[in-house]
Image (tube, rainbow, N blue to C red):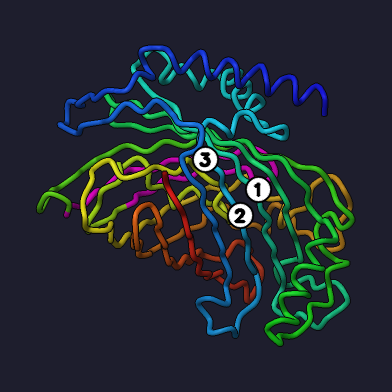
Amino acid sequence: MVLLFQANSAYADHIAQHQQDTDYTSGKQTSESGIEYELLNEAYDTGWALYIDNDVLVSAGKIDRDYTGGISVTLSGSRATSYPISIDSWRETLTKWMSLDSLYKKKSHFNLHSFSFGMTLFTPADLGATEPIFNDHPYASYLYISNSNEIVVPEDDIVYQSIFSIGFLGLDIAEDIQKAMHRVFGAAEPMGWDNQISSGGEPTAKYTFAAQKMLNRGQASQYTRHEFKLTTEANLGFSTNASAGFMWRWGRITTPWWSFNPHLSDYINMGVPIVNNSERTHKPEFFIWLGSSVQYRIYNAILQGQFRKSAVTFDDDEIEKFTYEITMGITREFFEGIRISLFRRQRTAALKIPGASAPTWGGITVSKSY
């Protein structure tokens, strides 16, 4: 822990010095496509966000299976690099080791950071069974912390994201949390948590690198417009996969196109930096959005297990290699800096077994930008 703290203190000093470079100096730059960017000199605290996902939100409380739910909190700004438990220096090391920083380091760009922590839960449909269930999604959980870096490259109309998360599969706290929630809402008590993936706890990690490219942007009035962008993402770790898709939003939009990232969510949103309005208006931001992606999955510990023996796991040939996802939502700014998003996601079945379900879940995001 002492070594981690020293490494992060040194890294925070590096960030503070790096922000004095011309790439981080406040100002504006216009890309060849005509999009104007404000070059942000990242503040210490730029905002926070709370993400809650749950399948009961789209089933009137009738479905509690597959991706049962998750919750995460994101703290945004340069402060994310200096927390005692920050792993941003590790994320930066991995990015450089894979030479991914060569995509932008010789171009004018600016960086934004965030720190997140949260948990995801998964269950089969039959919550009353105490014995292992071999024809449904296994019990599973992931408790984590993560650090993210967003790199905006104005001249290319591209934004890159790198995210590193570490945590534990199979902790007993997952059972305690779900049982407590079910008691509050009078739902059936889940009885099979002893059969969860890596039951008893096992450390794990994941590195994510993603990119967004603005393809089309139309202006109907000063603040009403649509934005259409290409999205790509690769994950390496307990969930190893690659995906590509699109994201579209339309309405009264006052935040930069690159700041909107609801697609960065293998399950729960790992957290990306929070950004305030780029244009001041007395009218609050209000827009709808739609996205879709195709994913090729190589490995998924949530279904296949990791190193520790698990009661229920699935072989590689029982996993669907290609899955498809569609997401839609609405975002409303209620007063300065406070935004609420409601969304729905649906993904094709992850398992090839008979009767495998296509998970559907909903969520709510509450964020505050400064």
Total tally of numbered discs in the picture: 3
Mark 3 in CB contact with mark 1 (< 8 angstroms): no
**Residue 72 marker:** 2
Which image quadrant for residue 145? Answer: top right
**Residue 268 marker:** none
Left or right of residue 304: residue 25: left
Q: Amino acid at mark 1?
A: Phe
Q: Amino acid at mark 2?
A: Ser
Q: Nearer the viewer, residue 273 or 280?
A: 280
The residue where tag 1 is placed is 117
Q: Position of residue 257 (x, y in %)?
A: 30, 43
Q: Residues within 10 Å of mark 1 (few under 14, many from 20)?
A: some
Q: Residue at x 84, y 54 (%)?
A: 198
Predominant SS of the magenta segment: strand
Q: Position of residue 178 (x, y in %)?
A: 74, 71
Q: Amino acid at mark 3?
A: Ser
Q: Secondary structure at mark 3?
A: strand
- For the residues labelled 3 and 1, the Cα–Cα distance comes to 12 Å
| Residues drawn in magenta | 224-247
127 vs 105: above or below: below
Q: Position of residue 352 (x, y in %)?
A: 63, 65
Indicate the quadrant containing the C terminus: top left, top right, bottom left or bottom right: top left
The residue where tag 3 is placed is 76
